[in-house]
């Protein structure tokens, strides 16, 4: 059996959550959460952690060569290498708008890659 400790990042309270796992990483017990959302967060962190990805993508014919982008929701950490490969090999034509969808459902994650900045055309 092992125990994992984490700080819940779902709200500013930052509850300290403990998860007990058996040798096959099956969850035996979760404690320290204050609400259902925290319990769900802890369960996901130990079984299939998710993160928002922030990076940048090439811009063609723009005043900047790159524009910052992010996933519009957290994606499974296990998909991050595939997602980064797709972004690295992609580009977008200027002009670029704010919150523009660049790639839909990237790596079948259910998340879109959206811009976080505008770039004017040259
Ligand atoms: S467990 Fe609930 S109350 Fe505590 S930090 Fe997480 S979301 Fe906030």
Image (tube, rainbow, N blue to C red):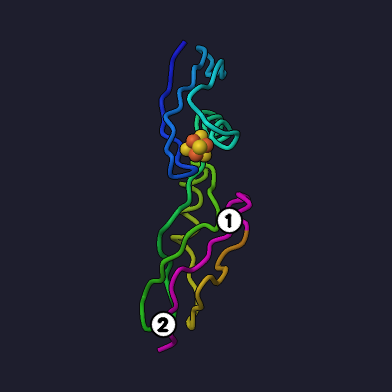
The residue sitting at 52% across, 12% down in the picture is: 22
Q: Residue furthest left?
A: 64
Distance in Å between CA atoms under marks 2 and 1: 23 Å
Task: Give the residue pinned by disc 2.
Answer: 62
Identify the magenta region.
Answer: 105-122
Q: Position of residue 101 (x, y in %)?
A: 57, 68
Q: Position of residue 51 (x, y in %)?
A: 48, 46
Question: Which numbered disc flags the more N-terminal residue, 2 or 1?
Answer: 2
Task: Give the residue pinned by disc 1.
Answer: 106
Q: Secondary structure at mark 2?
A: loop
Q: Categorize mark 1 by other alpha carbons within 10 Å: few (<14), some (14-19), many (20+).
A: some
Q: Is residue 112 above or below residue 32?
A: below
**113 and 12: which is toward the camera:** 12
Q: Position of residue 71 (x, y in %)?
A: 52, 57
The residue sitting at 41% across, 71% down in the picture is: 67
The residue sitting at 55% across, 68% down in the picture is: 102
């Amino acid at each position: 059996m092992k125990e994992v400790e984490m700080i819940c990042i779902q709200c500013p309270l930052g509850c300290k959550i403990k998860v007990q796992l058996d040798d096959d990483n099956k969850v035996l017990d979760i404690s320290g959460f204050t609400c259902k959302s925290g319990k769900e967060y802890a369960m996901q962190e130990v079984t299939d952690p998710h993160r928002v990805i922030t990076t940048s993508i090439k811009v063609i014919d723009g005043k900047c060569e790159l524009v910052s982008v992010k996933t519009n929701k957290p994606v499974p950490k296990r998909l991050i290498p595939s997602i980064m490969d797709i972004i690295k090999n992609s580009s977008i034509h200027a002009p670029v708008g704010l919150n523009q969808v660049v790639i839909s459902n990237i790596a079948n994650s259910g998340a879109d890659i959206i811009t976080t900045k505008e770039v004017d055309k040259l």
